[in-house]
Image: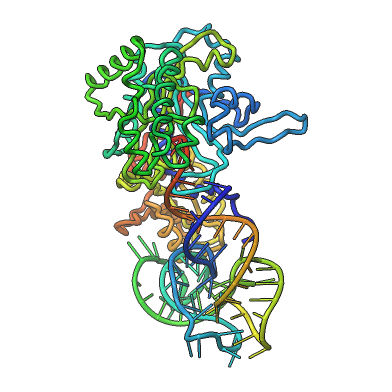
Amino acid sequence: MQFKAPKGTTDILPDVARRWQYLEHKAIELFSIYGYEPIVTPMFEHTEVFLRSIGISTDIVQKEMYTFADKGGRSLTLRPEGTAPVIRAYVDHNMNQLPQPVKLYYTGPMFRYERPQAGRYRQFWQMGIEAIGSDDPAIDAEAILLMINYFKSVGLKELTLYINSMGCDEDRPVYIRLLKDYAEENREKLCRDCQKRIDLNPLRLFDCKEESCQLVMKDAPKIIDYLDKECKAHFNKVRQYLDTQGIAYIIKPELVRGLDYYTKTTFEVVSPFLGAQNAIGGGGRYNKLVEEFGGPPTPGIGFAIGTERLSIAVEREGAFLSIDNKMDVFVAVPDEAARSTAINLLSALREAGISSDLDYMGRSLKGQLKYADKRGFKYTVFLGSRELESGEVVVKNMETSEQLEVPLKELVDKLSEILGRPGAVARVKGPGTGVQG
RNA sequence: GUGAUCGUAGCUCAAUUGGUUAGAGCGUCGGACUGUGGCUCCGAAGGCUGUGGGUUCAAGUCCCAUCGGUCACCCCA
């Protein structure tokens, strides 16, 4: 083995890739039902895009970005998250001219230079939505509801939803001052790290695991209590909508998302089936972000779901059991004479939407059967010189070993019937219908 | 960026106090009388023991470095 995938990256092999596809299909389906449309943005952006939006002092910008210079001397950065690029595109394409709100979803890889850990990779996948243009608390609730409903739809049951409000430009500075003052008064009771946090990022003081720090912070002022009238009303509305919808949540005043652009509502969903990195989805409102990119004052809200973390959580809850990946028909060819007929048959089967394959390894008939067994085909069709002569082929049910003879001419129709598939003609649809059989 | 722990065939693991051609199970491939799988039996392929130094008569086994995995911290999906 000469090469391995770079540190913190991994190959997604078929078994897992299949589950990811399933999760993505379900997400796209539900996002669409909620009115979201797909958008695909570049995997890298001008570094400035992330500096501006995520915030200079955040960990992401400070130590986690994959930044490089291209041959033209531009500073580019592999996207560490999905919101900033989408907002950049919103402004870039004057989407404020579209009917508001603009609701978009994306899926794809993100990149962060960190030490790998359970549930954390340098290249990781997210599925996210952004609703841009509305400050209605109902859309905050809708976003949260969508995330929760999605998790439920893929079989997750044990979830905890945390919500918080980060306030806005009006009330946050006032609160931060109060918090700093409080921390300053208790400086000597805090650990070394926390003493540094007082100036760097006082909101993080709440995260410390040190018992002494937690004791101090227990009585610290909480942002929730210092929201201004408007933010408070907004937050209460969100809660009210969630209550009405029967969504359980825990208000977590210390929930501070590590990106500077959040305002008002923030939220996060954690699963007990993961390790230390237990957040499978998180998001919040960002009412200043569009302006930051040079657009008109425009509110927005969104969330992102971590695909691999979700996949692990779903697997541990045993919800992947029903994915059927069996092939339909194996065409066994006893002798070379029938091979070209078999290849034609294969084409016909595939055109009819019947998944099928044959042997390309020069195996004996017995070997072909073994292969068909291991790959898990539902049926095996025998097509040799004997069948060529009689015009009847043998169809074997690989589970029950039952065999029946079917005229070669009727085989495709017969198999479609047995497999419960619509006929070849019925399944052919015009382009662009987006309908899957 | 910090810490802990690990690194032998595709996978899971063996290899007496350092001592001759590094083993097993599973998997892969082939075979067990001529056109049929799942069980059983037989056989084959597949490892410069992560890499590079060092100690020693001798290293998979000891030491150092490096790379990588795993887990945790920081922080996040």
Quadrant showing the N terminus of chain A: bottom right
Residue A339 place in picture, x, y as percent: 55, 55
x then y, percent, for residue A361: 56, 60
Taking A355 as reference, is A246 left or right? left
Q: Name which residue lies at 55% across and 48% down.
A: A8
Estimate the x, y position of residue A135 in percent, counting from the top left: 40, 11
In front of the other: A9 or A320: A9
Residue A144 found in image quarter = top left
State whether residue A192 is above or below residue A261.
Answer: below
* Front residue of A79 and A420: A79
**Residue A129, relative to residue A113: is it above or below?**
above
Residue depicted at x 22% and y 24%: A246
Q: Nearer the viewer, residue B25 or A292?
A: A292
Q: Residue at x 46, y 24 (%)?
A: A105
Which is nearer the eye, A185 or A232? A185
The C terminus of chain A lies in quadrant:
top left
Q: Residue at (33%, 10%) from the top-left corner?
A: A229
